[in-house]
Image: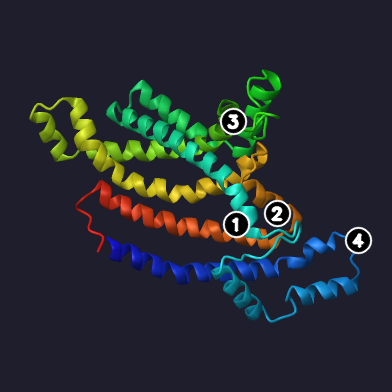
């Protein structure tokens, strides 16, 4: 197991370097480039602009710029924000806990509802519950995130005043968990809706396939209670393909947080990325995209490790 993890980490390093090189080139080639943020300032003269280009090393060949950035990134220095002048890593670290709270709660909610809906729909296929779950899944899957978020905000915040429209805490209530939960309800609902819809469909189809296996018929023929057949024999095997789907959806959940955090003014990494795009703050965007790529690699590794935990027949060697 340890050798497998080390081998995967070592093979991930050139992959991340390749992704970072591609991102760096794309960032330099978009209209305006890294100097776009200064183009909006009427007080910067052409002479000032030339001095900034030289100071930032943008007059160097592209591969030299990239190697200098990569060398700094290896030491934990992702550069400074062009807009605030603060270190990028410090800005990202400041917002990370907020995004982790939102993503963790959304994942728990999505797993609880998605897997439960899928299992119950598979136990009673083509029943009223199955049709209702299927309809809700397709509805949740087809709802545009931004539209659904705004609708929830208009109904529960603007119309009935039941929940706050945005932010993370009420004024003067920064340390109150109860107050924080109220601010989480709408963003978590929006972020979870697509995951619940897709994971319930995968769980249903995987469970249906397992329930048709011979060993399930044998377990029933031996007189085991249906609850034990489902929980002890069917559910664990049905989870194997779902593990991949769930793990690969994690980076997507991080991407979905960009839209959700923006709609609900949640001060997380997603909101920071959206704000950085509006300001053409390329160092911050580059840092966040690099972390997203790292998350994809990390959750791929976790998926392989969870495979071995769910199914002992799989050997990670």
Measure the C-alpha gap from mark 3 to mark 1.
25 Å
Residue at which label 1 appears: 288
Q: Quadrant of residue 236?
A: top left
Decide which of tag 4 and tag 3 comes sooner along the chain.
Answer: 4
Give the residue displayed 33% in from the left and 23% down from the top.
Answer: 127
Can you tell which mark lies on residue 180?
3
Can you tell which mark lies on residue 276?
2
Residue at which label 4 appears: 42
Measure the C-alpha gap from mark 2 to mark 1.
10 Å
Residue 308 rendering spot, x and y as whole percentages: 26, 52
Residue 268 rendering spot, x and y as whole percentages: 61, 45
Q: Is residue 237 above or below residue 19?
A: above
Q: Of tags 3 and 1, which is closer to the observer?
A: 3
Foreground pick, 190 / 6? 6
Give the residue displayed 64% in from the left and 23% down from the top.
Answer: 156
Decide which of tag 2 and tag 1 comes sooner along the chain.
Answer: 2
Q: Helix, strand or loop at disc 1? A: helix
Decide which of tag 3 and tag 2 comes sooner along the chain.
Answer: 3
């Amino acid at each position: 197991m340890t050798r497998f993890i080390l081998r995967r980490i070592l093979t991930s390093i050139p992959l991340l370097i390749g992704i970072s090189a591609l991102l760096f080139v794309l960032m330099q080639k978009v209209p305006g480039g890294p100097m776009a943020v200064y183009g909006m300032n009427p007080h910067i003269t052409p002479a000032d602009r030339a001095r900034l280009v030289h100071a930032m090393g943008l007059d160097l060949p592209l591969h030299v710029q990239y190697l200098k950035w990569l060398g700094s990134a290896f030491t934990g220095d992702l550069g400074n924000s062009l807009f605030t002048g603060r270190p990028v890593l410090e800005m990202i670290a400041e917002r990370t806990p907020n995004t982790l709270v939102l993503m963790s709660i959304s994942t728990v909610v999505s797993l609880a509802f998605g897997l439960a809906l899928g299992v119950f729909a598979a136990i009673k296929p083509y029943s009223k519950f199955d049709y209702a779950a299927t309809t809700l899944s397709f509805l949740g899957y087809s709802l545009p995130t931004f539209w659904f978020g705004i609708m929830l905000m208009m109904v529960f915040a603007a119309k009935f005043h039941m929940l706050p429209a945005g932010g993370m805490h009420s004024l003067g209530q920064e340390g109150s968990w109860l107050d924080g939960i109220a601010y989480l309800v709408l963003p978590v609902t929006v972020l979870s809706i697509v995951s619940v819809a897709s994971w319930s469909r995968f769980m249903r189809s995987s469970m249906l396939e397992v329930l048709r296996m011979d060993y399930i018929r044998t377990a029933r023929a031996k007189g085991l209670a249906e609850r034990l057949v489902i929980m002890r024999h069917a559910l664990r095997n049905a989870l194997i393909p779902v593990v991949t789907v769930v793990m690969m959806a994690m980076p997507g959940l991080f991407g979905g947080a960009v839209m959700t955090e923006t709609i609900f003014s949640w001060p997380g990494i997603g909101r920071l990325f959206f704000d950085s795009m509006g300001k053409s703050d390329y160092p911050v965007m580059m840092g966040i995209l690099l972390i997203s790529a790292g998350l994809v690699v990390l959750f791929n590794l976790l998926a392989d490790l969870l495979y071995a935990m769910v199914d002992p027949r799989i050997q990670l060697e």
